[in-house]
Amino acid sequence: MQPPIQSGPATEALALLTEQHELLEAVGRLCSAQGRLIDEDEAEDLLAVIEQRGLILQRAAALTVEIDKVIEAMPTTDAALPQIRQRRAAVADLARAISRSDAADRQRMSAKRDEVAAAIAAMNTNRAAAGAYRIDRATNGPGFQDTSA
């Protein structure tokens, strides 16, 4: 069991890491919603979730800078450093899980894009085939005209 930390830079670093972890947990929940919205083709809602994630991730990134400054100012012999490393590892694990989820979502979105492109190509092919059988009123008469007579 680790000794309780009373106050000072260690307490600040741990509080910031806790906040960052909570922010990334929120992003993780939004990742689940994002995946569902991709599957359901809900573009407007998907964009809103992506925007919300972006705001949360900006705050989490800003916390990284703050955390680094606080840890940098701590003595290398501080008793709280193992606990801080442990919390940082938990944050990093969560960030990796989010990254994996994002990679899977990108693949699903790419597959959806390819499906739409194939459907559009099929429509264009069908339209071109139908156009080949179209009768144009301007050319509905004889194909030539003898003007020598």
Image (tube, rainbow, N blue to C red):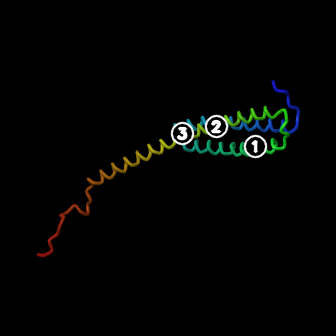
Estimate the x, y position of residue 132 in percent, counting from the top left: 27, 54
Mark 3 residue crowding within 10 angstroms, few (<14) / some (14–19) / many (20+): some
Mark 2 residue crowding within 10 angstroms, few (<14) / some (14–19) / many (20+): few
43, 8: nearer the viewer: 8
Estimate the x, y position of residue 34 in percent, counting from the top left: 58, 38
Q: Amino acid at mark 2?
A: Arg
Which residue sits furthest top?
1
Q: Earlier in the sequence, mark 1 or mark 3?
A: 3
Distance of mark 1 from mark 3, alpha carbons? Answer: 29 Å
Q: Quadrant of the C terminus?
A: bottom left
Residue highlighted by disc 1:
63
At horizontal 59% and vertical 45% (from top left) the residue drawn is 47
At horizontal 36% and vertical 51% (from top left) the residue drawn is 124
In-image side of 140 versus 105 (left or right): left
Which residue sits furthest left?
149
Distance of mark 1 from mark 2, alpha carbons? Answer: 17 Å
Q: Quadrant of the N terminus?
A: top right
Residue highlighted by disc 3:
38
Residue highlighted by disc 2:
96
> Does dot 1 land on a helix, a strand or a loop?
helix
Q: Are marks 1 and 3 in contact (CB under 8 Å)?
A: no
Tag of residue 127:
none
In-image side of 97 versus 8 (left or right): left
| Quadrant in the rendering for residue 16 | top right
Mark 1 residue crowding within 10 angstroms, few (<14) / some (14–19) / many (20+): some
Distance of mark 3 from mark 2, alpha carbons? Answer: 21 Å
Mark 1 or 3: the one toward you: 1
Q: Earlier in the sequence, mark 3 or mark 2?
A: 3
Which residue sits furthest front?
77
